[in-house]
Image (cartoon, rainbow, N blue to C red):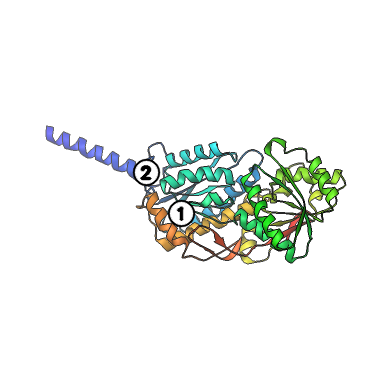
Amino acid sequence: MKLKKIMASILAAAAAITCLTACKSDGDSSGNDSANDSNSTASGSVLRIGGSGPLTGDYALYGNGVKNGAQLAIDEINAAGGINGCTIEFNMQDDEAGEEKAVNAYNVLKDWDMDLSIGTVTSGACIAFGAEAAKDNMFLLTPSSTAVECISADNAFRVCFSDPNQGVASADYIAEQNLATKIAAIYQSDNAYSAGIFDKFKSEASAKSLEIVSEQSFTSDNATDFSAQIQSIKDSGAELLFLPIYYSEASLILQQAKNAGLDIKVFGCDGLDGILNMKNFDISLAEGVMLLTPFAADATDEATVHFVTEYTAKYGNETMNQFAADAYDAIYIIKAAAEQAGINADMSSSEICDALKKAMTEITVDGVTGTSITWAADGEPSKAPKAVVINDGSYKAM
């Protein structure tokens, strides 16, 4: 009798352990009881994708665009059966575009048992986040971080163009479209994104016989008053103002340029995307502004029409920008690579990373931000650049 009681107790304990394990494998996302090292396995039939970005603060339109775009793709993929039988779980942390907070975000996601990552939204944060991911051999596909250093390790890839590529493409476009020959520029010298684009733009402009007649800069400490820079540009005889900066500072420059009577063509990069959604911004100030971006909401191709329709229905259009489109594509790119690699729930995050690194160089993806996109082992995408112009308060393909 005593032996029967002992056996019953053992069986009951085993059943309880089995139940707890099964519950976790079905997608316990709390992270409280999960392994905290980078080699944790995808939990049961769940694939956990983590990321971070500025969900609050000056660049929240970027971060929330990425969050929403990624979630839209995840919802579609899960509704269609997931990835190789795995349901996707998504966790987006707020790093406020800061390096230290990006590292904290990575550690939170690691404790959550992240299996792979869409990295971060902005370059400085991504460099810090990516350094941690490289140590752990955690796969990273950033939608929108453009600095070269963001994907310097072999575990990292990106959807967007790099800063050098944006700088070269901008100079080429301005020259090929005969937009101007005398160029002025305002860039942020202590920002990796802005300075990186301008450096390449400057060298390519020279090769294309574009004359930079006024080169102006600012730092984060003096990013509100641009009167001196604008006066120098007025005196230079420039025909076009190149702004490789973020929309927050660009909005101030456009307002102050109007107040100073500076009437000039303006050309920017993807950092200007989102300026039309800024609260209390007079969108008439952006009329005619051109920018290099891979996404135009008015495009009529099937992929863009589907994305715009579904995104607007779910989130409205406040955060429907290039960053949202990049993130939407990023999730589908991960799906394509995961299916090519045949990853499964029994693989560790490091094994998943090794499999995806190889698969990324083997796939071709048609997305919202480009068609026939491919990747080299250095993580850079190959796709055609596009430009849009702001006309009547919306982006129009050029």
Q: Is residue 30 above or below residue 46?
A: above
- Of residue 385 and residue 176, the one placed in the foreground of this image is 176
Q: Residues within 10 Å of mark 1 (few under 14, many from 20)?
A: some
Element carrying mark 1: loop
> For the residue marked with disc 2, what is the amino acid?
Cys
Position of residue 61 in the picture relative to residue 398 (left or right): left
Q: Please report whichever mark, 2 or 1, sits nearer to the chain's N-terminal start.
A: 2
On the image, the x and y values in percent for residue 2 come to 12, 32
Compare residues 266 and 175 and report the one nearer the observer: 175
Query: Residue 373, located in which quarter of the rendered image?
Result: bottom right
Q: In the rendered structure, are the residues bearing label 2 and label 1 in contact, judged by CB atoms less than 8 Å apart?
A: no
Q: Residue at x 48, y 58 (%)?
A: 335
> In the displayed image of the protein, which residue is found farthest to the right?
261
Furthest-top residue in this view: 2
- Residue 298 visible at all: no
Q: Which residue is mark 1?
A: 154
Position in image of residue 238 (x %, y %)? 82, 54
Relative horizontal placement of residue 354, taking residue 212 as reference (left or right): left
Q: Which quadrant holds the N terminus?
A: top left
Mark 2 highlights which residue? 23
Q: Amino acid at mark 1?
A: Asp
Q: Image point 85% across, 46% down: which residue?
A: 258
Residue 76 in the image: above or below residue 224? below
Q: Position of residue 309 (x, y in %)?
A: 64, 58
Q: Residue at x 68, y 46 (%)?
A: 246
In the picture, the quarter occupied by the C terminus is bottom right
> Residue 35 lies in what quarter of the image?
top left
In percent of width and height, residue 90 lies at 50, 47
Left or right: residue 137 compared with residue 143: left
